[in-house]
Amino acid sequence: GENVEQHPSTLSVQEGDSAVIKCTYSDSASNYFPWYKQELGKRPQLIIDIRSNVGEKKDQRIAVTLNKTAKHFSLHITETQPEDSAVYFCAASNSGGGADGLTFGKGTHLIIQP
Amino acid sequence: DTAVSQTPKYLVTQMGNDKSIKCEQNLGHDTMYWYKQDSKKFLKIMFSYNNKELIINETVPNRFSPKSPDKAHLNLHINSLELGDSAVYFCASSPNRGIAFFGQGTRLTVV
């Protein structure tokens, strides 16, 4: 089955700086890679996703890059703000995220220092 | 107007009891899931249903039994609860295009 590794487990950055979270996956058949943000006591919420036919996707301050050859993908947050503090999860799926569900990384606790 | 709703939000119960968690989605999605989030925040899929049919049953004790009366509902019944079952259980749904919408979670505490 799929295995997703995520690093770092904790990331502390100064407000206004950039944050990068990296994930690797094992199943070369995986073709869908979402990122979820989970605030304390809340549900995971999708913030951005990328499919295997695309190398990069951007949405305002967040971007995701995918390297299929190396089987890794990354989340980039620029101009970080206090409200970016949360746990971020990467995930992978080999069915477009449909019935086979998602395999999640273990999460990164992002701390934005004022 | 919640998209994926699950009840109850909190559940405290004694070891050995049987309990159920209910989940409903009003998004018209074909696929629903149960995920478990443990104390270290690790999210792991337990079950996946597509149009009321079981697709995935990960390595989950058979004390856990999902039931899908229709494609908008996926309930989780747990028999003989154990201390190690304490976790947050999330229901989710997907239109099979990848995006998964999560419910607000049920925090189960077994004492």
Image (tube, coloured by chain):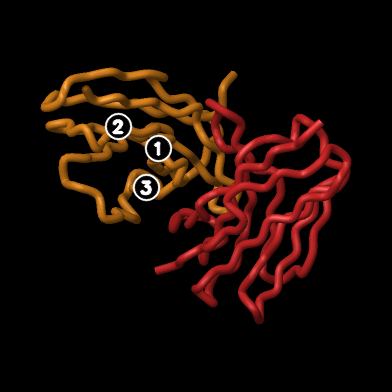
Verify CB contact (< 8 Å) between mark 3 and mark 2: no
Q: Is mark 1 on a helix, strand or loop?
A: loop
Picture colour for chain A: red
Residue B66, quarter of the rendered image: top left
Residue that carries the numbered disc 2 in the rendered image:
B86
Residue A81, quarter of the rendered image: top right
Position of A101 relative to B70 (above/below): below
Quarter of the picture containing the C terminus of chain A is top right
Position of A94 relative to B72 (above/below): below
Residue that carries the numbered disc 3 in the rendered image:
B49
Residue B87 can be seen, yes or no: yes
- Give left or right: position of A35 versus B69: right
- Give left or right: position of B77 versus A4: left
Verify CB contact (< 8 Å) between mark 1 and mark 2: yes
Picture colour for chain B: orange
Hey, what amino acid is under mark 1?
Ser
Q: Is mark 2 on a helix, strand or loop?
A: loop
Residue that carries the numbered disc 1 in the rendered image:
B39
Q: Which chain carries label 3?
A: B
Q: Mark 1 lies on which chain?
A: B
Report how far apart the C-alphas of labels 3 and 2 lie in the structure: 23 Å
Q: Does label 3 lie on the same chain as label 1?
A: yes
Q: How crowded is mark 1: few (under 14 residues within 10 Å), some or many (20 or more)?
A: few
Q: Nearer the viewer, mark 1 or mark 2?
A: 1
Residue A60 can be seen, yes or no: no
